[in-house]
Amino acid sequence: MAGNEKELKQEEMAVKSGEKQEISRSGISGLVFVGCLLLGLAIGFLAGNIVVGVIGGLGVGFIAMAAARYATGEW
């Protein structure tokens, strides 16, 4: 059974049983956060100041994660 057919079958079963089911999101915001953190680490390593790179990556990562959550409708 294909992915869409399986999801539709699960939704039909939930409707028949009277349960409400939340639609799961892709979770892209976590990947954006980790990507920014690793980029900050790499930039800090190349610049010779790892701590500043990691803290910069954290800051950019949190902002990018919030933007990704807003864009995907996770909020």
Image (cartoon, helix red, strand yellow):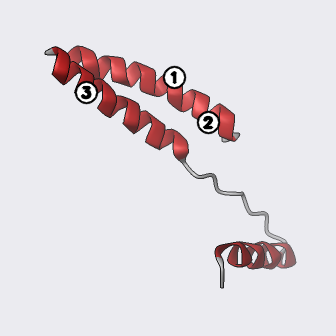
Left or right: residue 68 versus residue 23 is: left
Q: Marks 1/2: CA distance? A: 10 Å
Quarter residue 40 falls in:
top left
Is mark 2 in CB contact (under 8 Å) with mark 3?
no
Query: SS of the residue at dot 3?
Result: helix
Query: SS of the residue at dot 1?
Result: helix
Residues packed near mark 1 inside 10 Å, few (<14), some (14 to 19) or many (20 plus): some
Q: Residue at x 41, y 19 (%)?
A: 59
Q: Marks 3/1: CA distance? A: 17 Å
Q: Residue at x 70, y 40 (%)?
A: 73
Q: Is residue 73 visible?
A: yes
Q: Amino acid at mark 2?
A: Arg
Q: Earlier in the sequence, mark 2 or mark 3?
A: 3
Q: Residue at x 52, y 27 (%)?
A: 64
Query: SS of the residue at dot 2?
Result: helix
Q: Position of residue 14 (x, y in %)?
A: 78, 73
Q: Which residue is mark 3?
A: 41
Q: Position of residue 11 (x, y in %)?
A: 78, 72
Q: Is residue 50 visible?
A: no
Q: Nearer the viewer, mark 3 or mark 1?
A: 3
Q: Which residue is mark 2?
A: 69
**Can you tell which mark lies on residue 63?**
1
Using the image as rendered, state which of residue 42 and residue 66 is in the foreground: 42
**Can you tell which mark lies on residue 26?**
none
Q: Amino acid at mark 3?
A: Leu
Q: Earlier in the sequence, mark 1 or mark 2?
A: 1
Residues packed near mark 2 inside 10 Å, few (<14), some (14 to 19) or many (20 plus): some
